[in-house]
Image (cartoon, rainbow, N blue to C red):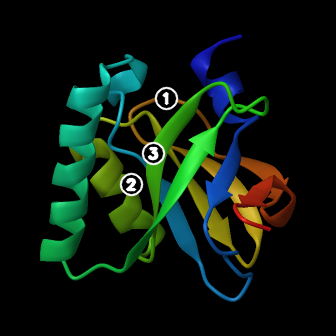
């Protein structure tokens, strides 16, 4: 299975449910270009991304993108911005793609990859709220 196909199966861990009333992007700064990094490098990338969002005054919330079996987990952020800004952020942090959630619908949107955007279904069934 290639990276794009793996991306299409992701589920998302969060501390509180993200409702259908807001549109947002799910972006990670970890593992640029799909190349696995060591945990300390990923932590540096993640901190730099959060600082960038702070400096841009863009609201964000922690979320973790995972394989369906939860074996692979990548720290990410639910970022409240428009889709074009989200794609620019993803490119700045060398990310292959982002997830875009619009009115509760989940899309996989390419950033660095040459792929067509894909609708993946409703976001809510892929959301795993921790502590519930």
Q: Label 2, label 1: how many angstroms apart (C-alpha)?
A: 13 Å
Mark 1 or mark 2, which is nearer the start of the sequence?
A: 2
**Image: 40 above or below 127:** above
Where the C terminus falls, by quadrant? bottom right
Q: Are marks 1 and 3 in contact (CB under 8 Å)?
A: no
Left or right, residue 116 beside residue 132: left
Percent position of residue 127, x then y: 75, 59
Mark 3 or mark 1, which is nearer the start of the sequence?
A: 3
Q: Label 1, label 3: how many angstroms apart (C-alpha)?
A: 24 Å
Where the N terminus falls, by quadrant? top right
Q: Label 2, label 3: how many angstroms apart (C-alpha)?
A: 17 Å
Answer with the quarter of the image where residue 2 lies.
top right
Q: Residue furthest top?
A: 1
Answer with the quarter of the image where residue 20 lies.
bottom right
Left or right, residue 97 beside residue 101: left
Residue bearing mark 2 = 87
Q: Residue shown at 32%/43% (left/top)? A: 29
Residue bearing mark 1 = 114
Look at discs 2 and 1 and give the one toward the viewer. 2
Q: Which mark is residue 100?
A: none
Q: Residue shown at 31%/20% (left/top)? A: 37
Percent position of residue 85, x then y: 34, 66
Q: Which mark is residue 75?
A: 3
Q: Residue furthest bottom?
A: 21
Under circle 2, the secondary element is: helix
Front one among 60 and 96: 60
């Amino acid at each position: 299975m290639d990276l794009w196909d793996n991306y299409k199966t992701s589920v998302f861990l969060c501390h509180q449910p993200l409702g259908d009333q807001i549109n947002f992007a799910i972006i990670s700064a970890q593992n640029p270009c799909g190349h696995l990094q060591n945990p300390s490098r990923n932590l540096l990338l993640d901190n730099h991304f959060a600082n960038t969002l702070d400096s841009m005054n863009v609201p964000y919330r922690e979320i973790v993108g995972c394989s369906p079996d939860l074996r692979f987990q990548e720290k990410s952020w639910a970022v409240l911005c428009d889709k074009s800004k989200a794609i620019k952020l993803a490119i700045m942090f060398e990310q292959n793609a982002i997830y875009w959630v619009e009115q509760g619908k989940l899309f996989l949107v390419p950033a660095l990859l040459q792929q067509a955007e894909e609708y993946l279904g409703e976001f809510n069934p892929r959301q795993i709220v921790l502590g519930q």
